[in-house]
Structures are given as C-alpha cells and as structure tokens.
C-alpha cells in the first residue's frame, strides 16, 4: 500500500510539473493587479483568489498570466499607453475602448467604523458627514451615488495600499474606511504592535455586492479568458478556489 501511495504521489507531482511546463510555454499576458489585497492578491503577487482565478482562466484559454503589482491609477495609465495587456479586478466604470470580461469575482465593500463611536451610517449619502478613506479608484467603481459623494466631499481621500486604511481608522485619523471586509480583517492582523487593532469595528453594508471583471486590449485574450472561466466553473475548480481562500460559503 505504501508503494502504491508513493506511486500516486509521484504521478500527481509529474502531472503538476507537466501542466506548469505547458503553461510556461504559452504566450504571456501582462496584467496590472493593483497592490496586495489578501486574500485576493497575496503579498507575493503569485497567489490569492483573484490571481488564481485569473491565472487559471487564462491558462485554460492558452495564455500565461504575468502579474504586475502596481497602484491602480498607474496600472490604468499603463494600460492606456499600451504598456500592459490588461487589468484585473476592475469595473466598466473606468471607461475606455478595451474589452471587458464576464464577471469573475465578487467583492463585498462596506463602510467600516470603530464601534465605540456609534456612527450612524445607513446609506451612502451619510458618508458626507464624516472623514473617509477609500481604496484607490473607489470613486470610479462603486457607482454613481458614491462617486457624487466623493467628488463633493471636503475630507475624502483614496489610498493605494489598503493597510493604510486600517492604520488611519485605528489611530483615529479618519472616521470611516471603505473597502472589502475580508481585506480589512486580513490587514488588521498585520499592523504594528503599537497600533491597537483589537478595537471593535462595525461593518455598514451600504454597498451592493461588487462584481469585478478583467479588461484586455486584445479581444482574443478576453474571449480566451471567458472560455477558461466558464470551464473553471463547470469543472468545480472555481468553487474549490473560493473555499481555499475564503472558507465555506453560505
């Protein structure tokens, strides 16, 4: 039995290595991924739910993803200048003439506050009463209502590194931070010891779920991504990745 188990182990390893070698020979697609936002894109830039879904979707369509961790505004400028082939985790709110994929991942953005402050936030417009820090390009991707509030807000900012939001909130420098709940929880565990990240927080669900797409300059890459994504959903790989990074879903 031990010999048989070892045989299966070596076979699985050989298959995995062969798949990686096949992927390495594929045409490269250079994409901007934003800065690290675990559990969606890990600090290594080589793992995460967002990254793995995109990588495997492209690989199934015959392309190899080469990710670049860049601030979203810089990545968007590079896409427009032809220096990148695409962007991950974006919405059609960025505009442009490039080719958007089907929705491939869903974020749940929330307004996060310190519970002890008992701030009243029941709708997007309530944010006008407080200082706010959001993730980069939030005013472009969170809908017209949020964009309107952000554009007329005297104390609104967007920060490239999302761990900065946690620092700003826990040190009392802003009233509200805007971003995905899972990302906020992850970075709360990564703060310096002198920052009290153990303070209770409240998540205000004033935003609908935020489905995201990838965008590519080449329609053939977009079509390959969509075909690969459909395959991942059909064969169960997509659900396996979600459970791996986010745990069992209700």
Image: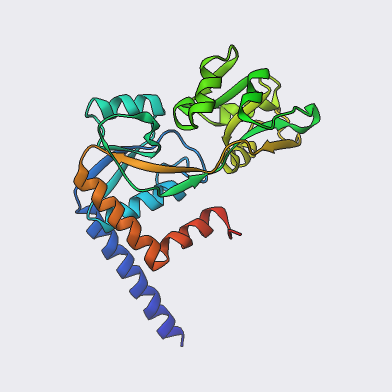
Q: Quadrant of residue 84?
A: top left
Quarter occupied by residue 208: top right
* Residue 92, position as x, y percentages in the image: 37, 35
Residue shown at the point (31%, 24%) measured from the top left: 77
User: Would residue 130 be seen by someone viewing this image from the given angle?
Assistant: no
Residue 52: x percent and y percent? 40, 51
Q: Residue furthest top?
A: 154
Residue 11 shows in the view: yes
Q: Residue at 41% of width from left, 63% of height from top?
A: 237
Q: Quadrant of residue 71?
A: top left
Q: In the rendered image, which quarter contains the C terminus?
A: bottom right
Q: Residue at x 58, y 57 (%)?
A: 247
Question: Residue 160 in the image: x percent, y percent?
Answer: 48, 26
> Residue 158, relative to residue 44: is it above or below?
above
Q: Position of residue 147 (x, y in %)?
A: 50, 24
The residue nearer to you, when weighing 242 against 149, is 149
């Amino acid at each position: 039995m031990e010999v048989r188990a070892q045989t299966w182990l070596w076979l699985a390893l050989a298959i995995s290595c062969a798949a990686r070698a096949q992927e390495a020979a594929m045409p490269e697609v250079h994409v901007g991924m934003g800065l690290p936002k675990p559990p969606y894109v890990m600090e290594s830039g080589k793992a995460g739910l967002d990254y793995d879904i995109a990588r495997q979707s492209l690989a199934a369509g015959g392309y190899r993803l080469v990710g670049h961790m860049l601030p979203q505004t810089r990545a968007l400028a590079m896409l427009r200048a032809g220096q990148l082939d695409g962007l991950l985790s974006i919405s059609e709110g960025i505009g442009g003439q490039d080719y958007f994929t089907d929705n491939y991942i869903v974020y749940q953005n929330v307004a996060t506050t310190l519970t002890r402050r008992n701030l009243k936030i029941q709708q997007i417009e309530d944010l006008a009463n407080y200082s706010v820090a959001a993730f980069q390009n939030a005013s472009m991707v969170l809908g017209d209502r949020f964009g309107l509030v952000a554009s007329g807000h005297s104390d609104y900012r967007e920060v490239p590194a999302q761990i900065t939001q946690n620092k700003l909130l826990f040190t009392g420098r802003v009233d509200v931070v805007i971003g995905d709940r899972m990302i906020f929880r992850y970075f709360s565990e990564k703060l310096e010891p002198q920052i009290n990240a153990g303070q209770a927080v409240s998540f205000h669900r004033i935003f609908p779920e935020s489905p995201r797409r990838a965008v590519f300059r080449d329609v053939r890459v977009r079509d390959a991504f969509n075909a690969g994504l459909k395959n991942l959903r059909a064969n169960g790989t997509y659900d396996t990745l979600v459970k791996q990074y986010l745990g069992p879903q209700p």
